[in-house]
């Protein structure tokens, strides 16, 4: 039988449809409410957050490194400049495969192994969104090749920057120093906020000592970028604050004259204005080109500098320590007057040999047969060792060390440069600390002529001479005399007040020393050095002997004297003697005679200074005007090396 079909129930179906419609509408309404709530949450409640995130996808902050402060000499001659250049930079977060990128980009822009190694070091220390320099100082060919292949290297770009340049090259290398690329060790000690975007930091000299002043404060700009991270336009700029400019007390003309006077022979010279402690010249020979270090020195160039036998990287003026020889005698004589151990008219008989009373220990004088009866002035003029042997013995090592220490020997001078050596001032305490042995009288008399344990830097001796010439008023030597916040801003002088009262109790004591040092120039070992100079000069020579009794003391052959001799040739002088304005010291590492070899260097420094004062250039000394070499009698009686000189 066929099943009967159920009859339709229109009313029931209508009710069912109505119920289903209401449920559907309710669900739709709930969905709309939920969607509206979500829209409200995103667009109202978290509006600020998502606007910022959206802007960050389009707007990027970019650090603007500050321009490094410039460095000038005292007359405004530019010594350290910033010149425009281009470098290759990488933003790590925008590079999909860093290893592949480094392998491929080398075929476009040549990279040295040093570039890769330095980049990897900095990459480990930097944040992923910060750009890291890959190659500095790109050539025009490098830039052109990269521009063509730029699409292949997302996150890599050519960026302009200012790089350091030293117009005078090796002339100021040991004073100004140089900047170098920031490495991993630098990133650990430097303020990351202040050095954002900065690729260089001061490595030596003024560049290092005044890093905080020269560096400045970085700024930033907001730039609009596209999907590839390329800059489209600059939206906002906050300029950086450039570093301050520095004005050195050094005069280029005096510096040039001092460097040229060495004629390539290893040594150092320092000139200081005794009225204020300002350094007028500081030279260390040989030197090097600091521009090699700015963008990363090659391994070959660095090896050549570090293995050179004449050590061009060694700052002899600041770090070289040498026995001072007879240059300490004027200071010792002044100590005798100040302590009341000597009067100017007191005499000593120089017979050619001095023996410690009650002892068989004897030392020879600097002249066979001696100088006869000498007072203080003549003892300085003739550099009579016997006089200073006895003076040192009468003073005693304790008073000798205490007095010489007042002039800055045995400690740092306080100059505004890092890495200064302290040298050695002979004393009981020093010997006890280094050898645990007692002090002997024989060592005292040797200390009286600047030998034995003595070790000074050219800067220390120049500083001491400037104190002597400056009426005994101590001032720390200074290289930076003023700062400037911008080319249009006024200079701000840096004061250099005395570090204490005068070391001299009676002006007449200084007058005696001056008379003796003037006599050195007019009739002593430095005779002839004042020829043609319009002002009186006060000076003193010193030859720190380093030979045995079996070898020749001096060699009058110029080539042998400079190449084979191991003596330290010193000369110190200040001028004008009656109103000192410059005190200069020169030291040759290999010379035969202090006045003969180092004296002309000091004279050329004084000649250059005279030109800076408005005086006419002085003609060079004729050959015959140089101080005469010592006689054969003098050669035979020069004290031999004690064997304990550091």
Image (cartoon, helix red, strand yellow):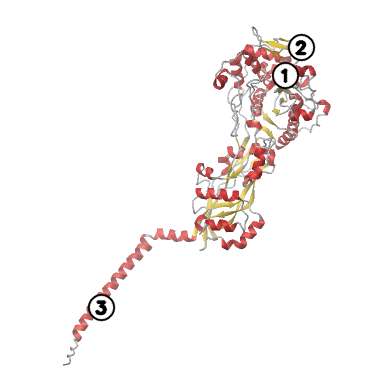
Mark 2 element type: loop
The alpha-carbon separation of the residues under discs 3 and 1 comes to: 125 Å
88 over 481 or under it: above or below: below
10 Å crowding of disc 1: few (<14), some (14-19), many (20+): few
User: In the image, what residue occupies the spot 72% across and 11% down?
Assistant: 353
Spatial CA span between label 3 and label 2: 136 Å
Q: Quadrant of the N terminus?
A: bottom left
Q: Is residue 468 left or right of residue 10?
A: right
Q: Nearer the viewer, mark 3 or mark 1?
A: 1
- Left or right, 522 with respect to 235, comes to right
Mark number for residue 369? 2
Q: Nearer the viewer, residue 353 or 276?
A: 353
Left or right of residue 598, residue 229 in this image:
left
Q: Is residue 149 above or below residue 243?
A: below
- Measured as percent of width and height from the top left, residue 50 is found at 41, 60
Closest to the observer: 309 or 119?
309
Assess whether mark 2 and mark 3 are in contact (beta carbons under 8 angstroms): no
Question: Which of the pair 447/557 is nearer the observer?
Answer: 557
Q: Quadrant of the C terminus?
A: top right
Of the image marks 3 and 2, the number of the one nearer the N terminus: 3
Label 3 vs label 2, nearer the camera: 2
Give the residue pinned by disc 1: 549
Structural distance between the alpha carbons of marks 2 and 1 = 18 Å
Disc on the earlier residue, 2 or 1: 2
Which residue lies at the image location 25% right of the left edge and 78% below the top edge? 21
Find numbered disc 1 in the image and state the secondary structure of the residue it sits on. loop
Q: Residue pushed farthest front?
A: 550
Whether residue 435 is visible to the viewer of this picture, yes or no, is: yes
Q: Which mark is residue 21?
A: 3
């Amino acid at each position: 039988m066929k099943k009967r079909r159920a009859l339709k129930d229109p009313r029931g179906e209508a009710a069912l449809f109505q119920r289903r419609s209401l449920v559907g509408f309710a669900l739709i309404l709930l969905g709309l409410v939920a969607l509206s709530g979500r829209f409200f949450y995103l667009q109202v409640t978290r509006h600020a957050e998502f606007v910022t995130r959206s802007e960050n996808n389009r707007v990027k902050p970019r650090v603007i490194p500050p321009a490094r402060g410039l460095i000038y000499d005292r007359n405004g001659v530019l010594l350290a400049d910033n010149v425009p250049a281009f470098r290759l930079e990488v933003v790590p977060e925008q590079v999909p495969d860093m290893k592949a990128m480094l392998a491929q980009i080398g075929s476009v822009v040549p990279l040295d192994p040093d570039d890769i190694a330095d980049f990897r070091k900095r990459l480990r220390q930097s944040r992923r969104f910060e750009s890291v320099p890959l190659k500095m100082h790109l050539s025009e060919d490098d830039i052109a090749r990269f521009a063509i292949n730029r699409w292949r290297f997302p996150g890599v770009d050519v960026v302009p920057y200012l790089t350091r340049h030293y117009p005078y090259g090796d002339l100021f290398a040991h004073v100004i120093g140089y900047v170098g690329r920031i490495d991993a060790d630098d990133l650990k000690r430097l303020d990351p906020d202040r050095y954002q975007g900065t690729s260089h930091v001061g490595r030596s000299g003024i560049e290092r000592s005044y890093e905080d002043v020269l560096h400045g404060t970085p700024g930033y700009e907001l730039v609009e970028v596209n999907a590839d991270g390329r800059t489209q336009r600059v939206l906002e700029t906050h300029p950086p604050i450039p570093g301050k400019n520095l004005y050195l007390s050094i005069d280029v003309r005096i510096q040039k004259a001092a460097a040229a006077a060495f004629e390539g022979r290893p040594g150092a010279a320092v000139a200081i204005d005794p009225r204020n402690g300002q350094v007028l010249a500081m030279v260390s020979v040989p030197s090097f080109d600091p521009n090699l270090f700015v963008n990363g020195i090659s391994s070959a160039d660095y090896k050549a500098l570090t293995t050179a036998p004449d050590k061009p990287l060694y700052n002899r003026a600041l770090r070289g320590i040498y026995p001072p020889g007879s240059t300490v005698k004027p200071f010792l004589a002044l100590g005798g007057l100040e302590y009341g151990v000597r009067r100017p008219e007191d005499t000593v008989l120089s017979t050619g040999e001095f023996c410690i009373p009650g002892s068989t220990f004897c030392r020879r004088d600097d002249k066979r047969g001696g100088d006869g009866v000498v007072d203080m002035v003549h003892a300085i003029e003739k550099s009579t060792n016997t006089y200073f042997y006895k003076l040192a013995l009468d003073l005693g090592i304790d008073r000798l060390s205490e007095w010489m220490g007042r002039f800055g020997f045995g400690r740092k001078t306080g100059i505004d440069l890092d890495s200064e050596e302290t040298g050695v001032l002979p004393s009981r305490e020093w010997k006890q600390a280094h050898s645990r042995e007692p002090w002997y009288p024989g060592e005292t008399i040797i200390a009286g002529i600047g030998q034995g344990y003595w070790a000074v830097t050219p800067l220390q001796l120049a500083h001491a001479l400037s104190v002597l010439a400056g009426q005994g008023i101590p001032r720390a030597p200074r290289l930076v005399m003023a700062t400037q916040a911008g080319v249009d801003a006024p200079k701000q002088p840096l004061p250099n007040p005395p570090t204490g009262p005068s070391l001299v109790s009676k002006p007449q004591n200084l007058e005696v020393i001056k008379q003796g040092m003037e006599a050195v120039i007019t009739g002593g070992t430095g005779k002839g050095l004042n020829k043609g100079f319009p002002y009186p000069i006060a000076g003193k020579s010193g030859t720190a002997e380093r030979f045995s009794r079996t070898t020749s003391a001096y060699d009058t052959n110029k080539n042998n004297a400079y190449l084979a001799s191991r003596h330290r040739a010193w000369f110190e002088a200040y001028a004008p003697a009656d109103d000192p304005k410059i005190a200069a010291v020169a030291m040759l590492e290999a010379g035969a005679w202090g006045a003969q070899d180092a004296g002309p260097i000091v004279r050329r420094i004084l000649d250059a200074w005279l030109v800076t004062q408005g005086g006419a250039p002085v003609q060079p000394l004729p050959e015959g005007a140089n101080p005469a070499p010592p006689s054969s009698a003098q050669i035979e009686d020069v004290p031999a090396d004690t064997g304990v000189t550091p």
